[in-house]
Image (cartoon, rainbow, N blue to C red):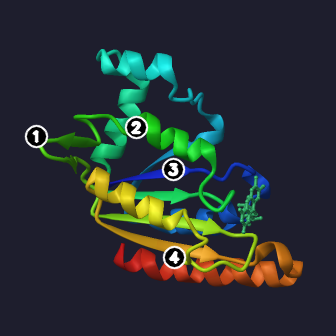
Amino acid sequence: MKKLLYIDGCIRDELSRTKKIATPIINALKEKYDVETFVLNDMNLSVVQKELITKRNNGEIDKEVISWAEMVRDADRIVISAPFWDMSIPAALKNFIELCSIFDVTFKSNDKTCYGNCKAEKMLFITTRGMDIDTGSNLEQATPYLKALSWLWGIGDLFVVSAQNMDYVSEQEIENKINIAIADGLKIVKEF
Ligand SMILES: Cc1cc2nc3c(=O)[nH]c(=O)nc-3n(C[C@H](O)[C@H](O)[C@H](O)COP(=O)(O)O)c2cc1C
């Protein structure tokens, strides 16, 4: 079976609406893929600061972190779930991405530019937003960032499942939005 890497960035965990959308989608994907999951809440993510970057530049990279980056590199498909925080993604997810963005693992370079080294032809991003902000609007800086990252890492198409205006509607409307997003996601699963 082909491999799918699921990066669970639903920081609020069991309270997370994003997770309520992602869970049935991931369960459906388990029929097609061998799914490995990183739950960012459960990981000990060091912030990439001076000491770490100096070590990295000297070729000293934590073996566990390299193994995470290799899993990103080798996955046939990648799914990321994360809420919309401060107009983008939660820092824990950005942090995980910085840790995995390792030269000669997730990307390479020649004498002119960087290019991707990951296998996945498709990536799915699942998110929910508090305000009524559309995917790709100028105020929405999560999807454009993940698209740019897909380019750096050499990942193919980015699919997005989202629900928005979650903080300004009734519980019933939130549930309806979650169910619509799950249905959207299950449609994507067929072509994913
Ligand atoms: C720390 C934090 C930052 C947030 N920042 C934004 C934001 O910038 N824009 C927005 O529309 N909603 C923002 N929200 C609201 C969330 O996007 C919204 O409640 C979302 O549904 C939460 O997803 P979750 O239930 O999966 O945690 C923020 C919520 C939190 C807790």
Which of the pair 157/135 is nearer the observer? 135
Horizontal side of residue 32 vs 82, given as left or right: left
Residue in the picture at 85% in, 81% down:
169
Q: Which residue is mark 1?
A: 111
Q: Amino acid at mark 1?
A: Asp
Lower sequence index among marks 4 and 1: 1
Horizontal side of residue 29 vs 110, given as left or right: right
Q: Which residue is mark 3?
A: 7
Element carrying mark 2: helix
Lower sequence index among marks 3 and 1: 3
Q: Tell me the distance, in whole angstroms, between the alpha carbons under discs 3 and 1.
A: 32 Å
Depicted 45 relative to depicted 171: above or below: above
Element carrying mark 1: loop
Residue 191 position in % (x across, y down)? 35, 78
Residue 39 position in % (x across, y down)? 59, 43
Q: Tell me the distance, in whole angstroms, between the alpha carbons under discs 2 and 1.
A: 22 Å
Which of the pair 142/68 is nearer the observer? 142
Q: Tell me the distance, in whole angstroms, between the alpha carbons under discs 4 and 2.
A: 25 Å
Q: Amino acid at mark 4?
A: Gly
Q: Which residue is mark 4?
A: 136
Lower sequence index among marks 4 and 2: 2
